[in-house]
Image (tube, helix red, strand yellow):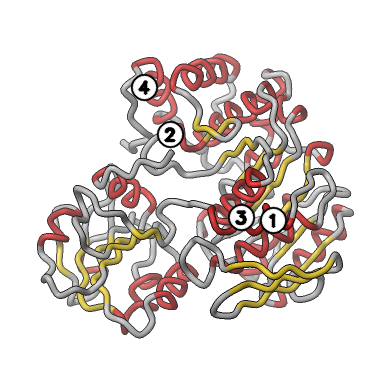
């Protein structure tokens, strides 16, 4: 049984147990169920504050974190829904800047489950229905909504043009192949083009669509989607530009130029996510955000378990430990860039169906050792999947205890579910 969260509140736990029993029905490739559910709930998705809707394979969560930080730095009140949660289910629903409280969460989930009788919704559909129901009832200046999986058929794609301020697509890569590359008539055959087709499904008439740079076939699919939807398209390298130095970030578009500090989140890839957030703000006219707020937000944004430097705590002691939940080739390449030129001890756990070479391959030259640990509540890849030099460990504390005291950094990676357990053990609960 998968662990969808634990709560000390018995009313919340009762609803989490109901959520844990839900699955995505095989073969469902439409939004009929979630639309029917929203209809029963009074269509809260049509009464949201201006929405920033973000899709992508890698970086969409970080882009959402930068958007929220920049909006809040300007004094705006912001609702946000992101996924997955790391330690507490409440992390998925942030209401007016704060994680939803247990008492209200229990009421919301109960309301959604009552409304969904006979519909058999998925875990994510119930979650989005609960989030949008609350967002529609609590005043705010903006919403930041992260796509769960894909875009075209994601539960968040019930959003109509009337509530959307801007849509954005972060970096693209191959992931969730079982769902996003499933054969379907009328879709592109090339994998990266099909991924772009799915992500660009969030495009809406008249709503600005802001994108990164992609391979030519992916860009073509996005251009087609924008043309079909009838939305203005702003692409990096054509309509907006970003570059960095060792001390700052330079952003430019038709509105002018910005000289900004480097992002507060570590890793060179965060420049791209920051720039996409900036471009989304500057290519829409529903919510005004000042240049000073943009600069402040890019410094203060926080996004746990994405190349996170762990604080001294019960798990880490005073050792240099980095945590990242990435599990696909794009994440592996990002980690390899971050640790280029140094050696690192890798503690890794990946759920079955993932490709161990996605991380171990790009990191190969940097790896001093590999210890493989289970992923709590999930079937994980066996130790031998990670090569002949990999060693098994019972858990993360055991793996850390087996490492020599050589001063080298440690990277814990491979799964956001594992990352959540690490944060819990180190008492760094996201808030």
At which x and y percent is residue 155?
Answer: 63, 39
Instruction: Using the image as rendered, state which of residue 184 and residue 265 is in the foreground.
Output: 265
Q: Quadrant of the N terminus?
A: top left
**Above or below, comparing residue 366 to residue 282 in the picture:** below
Residue depth check, mark 2 versus mark 1: number of the one nearer the observer: 1
**Residue 172 sits in quarter:** bottom right
Q: Which mark is residue 13?
A: 4
Q: Earlier in the sequence, mark 2 or mark 4?
A: 4
Instruction: Report which residue position mark 1 lands on.
Output: 292
* SS for dot 3: helix
Q: Is residue 106 left or right of residue 53?
A: left
Q: Which mark is residue 313?
A: none
* SS for dot 4: helix
The residue at 67%/21% (across/down) is 137
**Above or below, comparing residue 223 to residue 428 in the picture:** below
At which x and y percent is residue 111?
Answer: 56, 15
Quote the CA–CA distance across marks 2 and 1: 33 Å
**Residue 415 sits in quarter:** bottom left
Q: Is residue 36 visible?
A: no
Check disc 1: other Cα within 10 Å, few if <14, some if 14-19, many if 20+.
few
- Looking at the image, do the residues carrying marks 1 and 3 touch, with CB atoms under 8 Å apart? yes
At which x and y percent is residue 62?
Answer: 55, 56
């Amino acid at each position: 049984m998968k662990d969808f969260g634990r709560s000390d509140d018995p009313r919340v736990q009762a609803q989490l147990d109901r959520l844990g029993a839900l699955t995505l029905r095989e073969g469902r490739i439409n939004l009929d169920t979630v639309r029917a559910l929203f209809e029963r709930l009074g269509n809260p998705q049509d009464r949201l504050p201006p929405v920033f809707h973000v899709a992508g394979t890698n970086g969409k969560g970080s882009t959402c974190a930068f958007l929220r930080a920049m909006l809040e730095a300007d004094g705006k009140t912001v609702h946000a829904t992101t996924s997955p949660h790391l330690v507490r289910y409440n992390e998925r629903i942030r209401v007016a800047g704060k994680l939803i409280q247990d008492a209200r969460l229990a009421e919301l989930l109960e309301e959604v489950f009552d409304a969904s009788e006979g519909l058999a919704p998925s875990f994510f559909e119930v979650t989005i229905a609960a989030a949008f129901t609350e967002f529609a009832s609590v005043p705010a200046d903006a919403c930041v909504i992260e796509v769960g999986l894909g875009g075209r058929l994601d539960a968040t794609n019930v959003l109509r043009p009337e509530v959307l301020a801007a849509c954005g697509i972060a970096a693209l890569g191959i992931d969730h192949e079982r769902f996003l590359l499933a054969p379907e008539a009328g879709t592109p055959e090339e994998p990266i083009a099909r991924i772009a087709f799915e992500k660009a499904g969030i495009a809406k008439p008249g709503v600005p669509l802001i994108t990164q740079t992609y391979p030519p076939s992916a860009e073509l699919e996005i251009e087609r989607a924008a043309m079909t939807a009838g939305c203005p398209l702003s692409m990096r390298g054509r309509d907006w530009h970003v570059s960095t130095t060792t001390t700052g970030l330079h952003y430019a578009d038709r509105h002018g130029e910005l000289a900004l500090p480097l992002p507060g989140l570590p890793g060179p890839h965060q420049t791209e996510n920051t720039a996409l957030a900036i471009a989304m703000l500057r290519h829409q006219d529903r919510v005004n955000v000042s240049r000073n707020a943009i600069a402040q937000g890019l410094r203060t944004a926080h996004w746990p378990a994405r190349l996170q430097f762990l604080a001294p705590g019960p798990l880490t002691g005073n050792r240099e430990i980095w945590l990242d939940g990435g599990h696909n080739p794009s994440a592996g390449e990002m980690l390899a860039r971050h640790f280029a030129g140094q050696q690192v001890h890798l503690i890794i756990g990946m759920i079955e169906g993932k490709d161990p070479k996605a991380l171990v391959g790009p990191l190969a030259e940097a790896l001093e050792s590999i210890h493989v640990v289970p992923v709590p509540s999930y079937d994980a890849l066996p130790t031998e999947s990670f090569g002949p030099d990999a060693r098994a460990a019972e858990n993360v504390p055991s793996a850390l205890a087996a490492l020599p005291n050589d001063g080298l950094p440690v990277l814990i990676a491979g799964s956001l579910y594992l990352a959540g357990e690490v944060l819990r053990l180190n008492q760094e609960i996201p808030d």
